[in-house]
Image (spheres, rainbow, N blue to C red):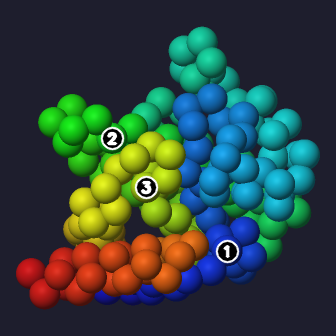
Amino acid sequence: MPIEIIQADITTLDVDAIVNAANPGLLGGGGVDGAIHRAAGPGLLAACRALPEAAPGVRCPTGEARITPGFALRARYVIHTAGPVWRDGRHGEARLLASCYQSALRLLRENHGRTIAFPAISCGVYGYPAALAASVAAHTLRDALVGDDIDVTLCCFSEQMALVFQHALNEAAAE
């Protein structure tokens, strides 16, 4: 599996695309979303505002992805995806989270990218339990990358999150 786990600031990575764990409005926020907007500069917010709304105030429905240029980032593109808010695991959260990874990979392929970095989608303020989110990510990526030449980096901000994702990746690889 061409998947690497690192502990780093995703805004510093030199890849074709970084994934932004965004809110559905795509107008910036806290956590990784805010960090990406700050690092990319004001052009990113303008590009997000230019994206059509799918519903009032929603440019990216949960589980989907949108792409913009990377502006001041080293990455050529930012792929924005709106992960699910954790409720209790019985409201389609795993399916929606898997769709975030699948949708981001689809946009990368459509834009002829080969390298992508994902944060821990939905693990911050959206409250998705890290071990469960990591398992969804590892299994979804394992299945989506069969026979593919895409290099995936799972970029974790903390050492603890990197360990959780590494454990999930090891388990998915062993199955």
**Element type where label 3 sits in the image:** loop
Q: Left or right: 121 with respect to 167?
A: right
> 146 above or below 123?
below
Q: Left or right: 68 with respect to 104?
A: right
Q: Which labelled disc corresponds to residue 86?
A: 2
Residue 44 position in % (x across, y down): 81, 46
Q: How many marks?
A: 3
Q: Which residue is mark 3?
A: 123
**Element type where label 2 sits in the image:** loop
> What is the three-letter code of the residue carrying label 2?
Trp
> What is the three-letter code of the residue carrying label 1?
Asp
- Measure how far apart labels 2 and 3 are at the Cα level: 9 Å
Residue at the farthest top position: 56
Q: Which residue is mark 1?
A: 9
Residue 166 location, quadrant: bottom left
- N-terminal label among 2 and 1: 1
Graded by Cα atoms within 10 Å as few (under 14), some (14 to 19) or many (20 or more), the crowding at tag 3 reads: many
**Can you say which quadrant of the picture contains the N terminus?**
bottom left
